[in-house]
Image (cartoon, helix red, strand yellow):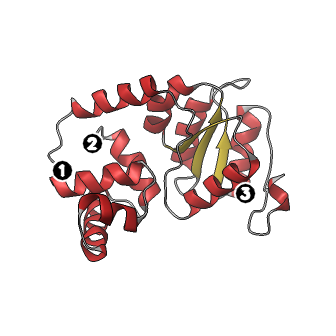
Amino acid sequence: MLALEEDIEVAGEAGDAKTALAQIEAFSPDVVLMDIKMPGTDGLELTRQVKQKCPACNVIMLTLYDEYLPQAIEAGAVGYLNKDIKREELVRAIRAVREGRFPLGLSVSRESLSQMVSFAESKQRPLLSERELAVLGLMARGETTSEMCSKLFLSPASVKRSARAIFEKLGVRNRSEAVAEAYKRKLI
């Protein structure tokens, strides 16, 4: 199904963690679709291994379980989608990750999101300014620069300046990496 898209090349497929890791190491794909439940190592641990061996790989969790969202983000996933996603939505999500955005499936439960928000609010945030945290939070929701401008009442230049400061402070190159690193550091 993905191979039908002109701008997507399917580099490989795997039914278990060992085969998946070998293919990821061999092909260094831009985006990896990962299941949480699989034979051998689970998808969360495999995501950690992928991020160690191939930091540039962006992992999207494609799963039936919404309760693993915080662990997936902490492991390094930059997207979290339900397996019942429509083809067009999956293709859009893959493209979004390539553009540095963080796709989150609409089927993720309110409870799971509430747990993440509560967890995030309980942490200290000394590294980033309040504005940078606001921009980072909207990045995590997959908002575009213009949407961030509208919600934060900022100019595009201010949002972009805040994004650059976030990238520099977190030592990352793009929005996806910033969101993943922020969750690892428990900044959001």
Q: Is residue 23 left or right of residue 99?
A: right
Q: Which marked residue is nearer to the observer: mark 1 or mark 3?
A: 1
Judging from the image, what secondary structure is the residue with disc 2 in? loop
Quadrant of the rendered structure where residue 28 is?
Answer: bottom right
Residue type at the position of mark 3: Phe
Q: Are marks 1 and 2 in contact (CB under 8 Å)?
A: yes
Judging from the image, what secondary structure is the residue with disc 3 in? helix
Residue at 51 percent across and 26 percent down: it is 68
- From the top left corner, tell me how far across and down residue 163 is, in percent: 31, 65
* 24 to 4, vertically: above or below: above
Instruction: Decide if residue 43 is in sight here.
Output: yes
Judging from the image, what secondary structure is the residue with disc 1 in? loop
> Mark 2 highlights which residue?
187
* 78 to 147, vertically: above or below: above
Point out the residue furthest to the bottom here: 157
Residue at 31 percent across and 74 percent down: it is 156
> Mark 3 highlights which residue?
27
Q: Residues within 10 Å of mark 2 (few under 14, many from 20)?
A: many
> Mark 1 highlights which residue?
127
Q: Which marked residue is nearer to the observer: mark 3 or mark 2?
A: 2
- From the top left corner, tell me how far across and down residue 47 is, in percent: 57, 38
